[in-house]
Image (cartoon, rainbow, N blue to C red):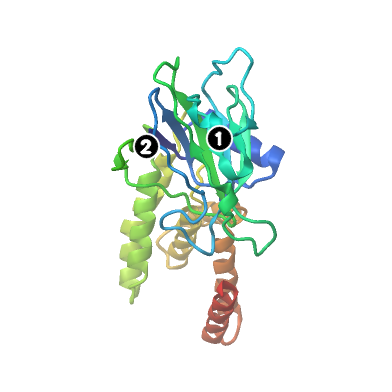
Amino acid sequence: VEDVIVPTGTDAILDHIEDRIQDVIGIPRAHSDPWQILRYDPGYRARWEHTDCHHPGFDPSNDRFVTVLLWLSLCEEDRGCAPERHSDHAETVEDGATIFPQYGLRIRMPAGGLVMYASMGPGPAGGCNPDAMHYAGPLAVSAKGPKVLLQKWYYQYPVEPSLPSTPLAICDPSPEGQCKRFLLAPGSGSPAVQAALASLEGKAAVIDSLEGLEELIGSELARLSRALSLEVVPGSLGRSAHWRSIYMAANFRVVAWQIGNLGAAARREALAQLRVALQRCAVCEDVLSLMLRVLVDGDGPAAAQEAEIEAQRQAC
């Protein structure tokens, strides 16, 4: 199985589909991981039953809620492809269907067919739903072509896009196990943005002087700004999904203007970027509220401590 990760800003068509899902279905794109192009070649036989929630390394406070699958491969059946009931005898069918045993469903769609399903139980307190367990069924060696899907995961809250280190291969040691290869779409600048943000945040945490701040602005801020400027490619809609990175870079530009390292034009650009980022990044908005309280309240440290206590209470 090949899993090609395509971050926002890499391809105009996938960016547009992301917009359509938000506009038509109402799922905010800021809550999603990058697109994944999944390819199952003829002869695929591994059976990996799983739910999309409670995945390895998941964040309990922000798990995957919804998955979108969009079929790209052509339907080989004369009678067409559509969801149908799954039964025990259907286990011998090797048509590459996506199977939900607990729901009794096997799903194949024509090219362009979209399926959306929830991973979590109903209501605000709904947890990871074991009934949403599913797997990709086997695909016959004689199949005319591979099964190809677009996949996107959506979370409860906005997320900074994540992706594994690529290229990467994970193999199943079972007798019929196969390997899953993770690749990154050519031209994507997303890893450079993530690395630059991590470096900036790590060094910002230990700044203890104005000289250290100026050095950070001259090196780490410049690195993050350069990565963001190179992230989106000409073949995309020109939009980044790294709202938190944009927010952090804009904030540091405002700080650079305050200490005289950048001019008024940089401040105006930074404020415009902050407005855009705050429409997407709920975490950034919380940080901004805290910053304003610290600056405006007479007892800034007390305001910061109170906000931290409230954040811990909500997390519990």
Give percent across and percent down for residue 149.
50, 30
**Which residue type does callout 1 highlight?**
Asp
Can residue 9 be seen in the rendering of this structure? Answer: no
**Of the pair 123 and 15, the residue shown nearer to us:** 123
Give percent across and percent down for residue 177.
33, 38
The quadrant in which the N terminus is found is top left
Number of numbered discs present? 2
Q: Which residue is mark 2?
A: 184
**Of the pair 125 and 280, the residue shown nearer to us:** 125
Q: Quadrant of residue 75?
A: top right
Q: Residues within 10 Å of mark 1 (few under 14, many from 20)?
A: few
Q: CA distance from mark 2 to mark 1?
A: 37 Å
The quadrant in which the C terminus is found is bottom right
Q: Which residue is mark 1?
A: 88
- Image position of 103 (left or right of 160): right
Residue depicted at 60% across the width and 22% down the height? 110
Give percent across and percent down for residue 23.
69, 39
State the mark number for residue 295: none
Under circle 1, the secondary element is helix
Residue depicted at 48% across the width and 28% down the height? 92
**Of the pair 164 and 130, the residue shown nearer to us:** 130
**Which residue type does callout 2 highlight?**
Leu
Tell which tag, 2 or 1, sits nearer the viewer.
Answer: 1
Residue depicted at 58% across the width and 27% down the height? 108
